[in-house]
Amino acid sequence: MKLKAFTDGASRGNPGEAAIGIIIKSEDNTTIETHKKYLGTTTNNIAEYTALLVCVETIKNSET
């Protein structure tokens, strides 16, 4: 099954308060999972990378 994944991470200030958001959809655009998380104080780059890593882990764990 093919999936579509949308990720974003951002911080208010750099570094600053940061969070991530993830949406995973099926081929027919049905939302399979959403995830959001507050990260605390970190940089914008760390927030972006964290969003990607959490997305990959979420997909990996759902396949088992």
Image (spheres, grey):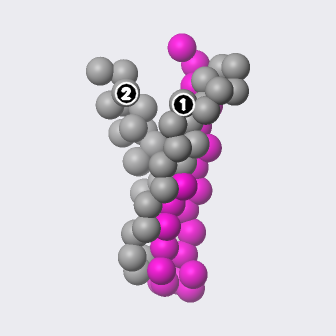
Q: Can residue 9 be seen in this view?
A: yes
The 10 Å Cα crowd at callout 1, few under 14, some 14 to 19, many 20 or more, is few
Which label was assigned to residue 32? 1
**Residue 58: which quarter of the image?**
top left
**Residue 40: which quarter of the image?**
bottom left
Question: Is 52 a magenta residue?
Answer: no
Q: Position of residue 15 (x, y in %)?
A: 48, 83
Q: Is mark 1 on a helix, strand or loop?
A: strand
Q: Position of residue 43 (x, y in %)?
A: 47, 76
Q: Is residue 60 left or right of residue 48?
A: left
Q: Pointers 1 and 2 in contact (CB under 8 A)?
A: yes
The 10 Å Cα crowd at callout 2, few under 14, some 14 to 19, many 20 or more, is few
Is 8 situated above or below 62? below
Is 20 situated above or below 22? below
Name the residue rendered at 32%, 31% in the picture.
Answer: 61
Residue bounds of the magenta highlight: 1-21
Q: Name the residue under label 2.
A: 62
In the image, what residue type sits under mark 1? Answer: Ile
Name the residue rendered at 49%, 67% in the picture.
Answer: 19
Which label was assigned to residue 55? none
**Mark 1 vs mark 2: which is more N-terminal?**
1
